[in-house]
Amino acid sequence: MGRVWTYWEFDHPLGNTVRVISTPLGLEIFAEDVFNVVAAELNNEKVVLMNIHSQERYVVIESEVVKVKTLNFTAINTLKTIVKADLINKFLHWVRIKIRPIFQRQYL
């Protein structure tokens, strides 16, 4: 098992929770949460088949270490080939405006 990451939860305007990990390479969002916001019909298995690059990270959920798939901004942008680009753009805009500034302040 690799490093166990800490994640943060944010409330998306559509009523979904979005969990985020801050890595040295940038923010990564739980793939499951991205799908719930932009395309509920997608899931991790379908994304693997579509060759969307995801990371596997270990996190603690309910006192248990669990492996989750995460997507960075590039991987989320790749979803534009199967999901309306406008939905992806709105989601990424929300992340840039509401979430990224919180993590940028941590590293100033």
Image: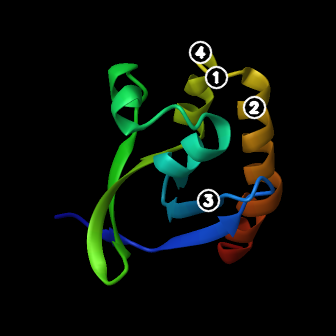
Dot 4 or dot 3: first in sequence order is 3
- Amino acid type, callout 3: Val
Q: Is residue 102 left or right of residue 61?
A: right
25 versus 44 height, above or below? below
Q: Nearer the viewer, residue 5 or 44?
A: 44
Q: Nearer the viewer, residue 65 or 23?
A: 65
Q: Secondary structure at mark 4?
A: helix
Residue 59, percent from left and from top: 36, 69
Q: Which residue is mark 1?
A: 83
Which residue is label 2 attached to? Answer: 87
Q: Where's the C terminus, which quadrant? A: bottom right
User: Regarding mark 1 in the picture, which secondary structure is present there?
Assistant: loop
Which numbered dot is residue 45?
A: none
Residue at coordinates 43% horizontally, 37% vertically from top-left?
43
* Mark 1 vs mark 2, CA separation in Å: 7 Å
Q: CA distance from mark 2 to mark 4?
A: 12 Å
- Pointer 3 with pointer 2, Cβ within 8 A: no
Q: Can residue 26 be seen here?
A: no
Q: Which residue is mark 3?
A: 18
| Measured Cα–Cα span from mark 3 to mark 1 | 18 Å
Residue holding disc 4: 81
Residue shown at the point (77%, 52%) measured from the top left = 14
96 sits left or right of 40 in the view:
right
**In the image: residue 63, left or right of residue 29:** left
Residue 52, image quadrant: top left
Q: Amino acid at mark 2?
A: Leu
Q: Position of residue 9 (x, y in %)?
A: 61, 70
Real-space Cα separation, disc 1 to disc 4, in angstroms:
6 Å
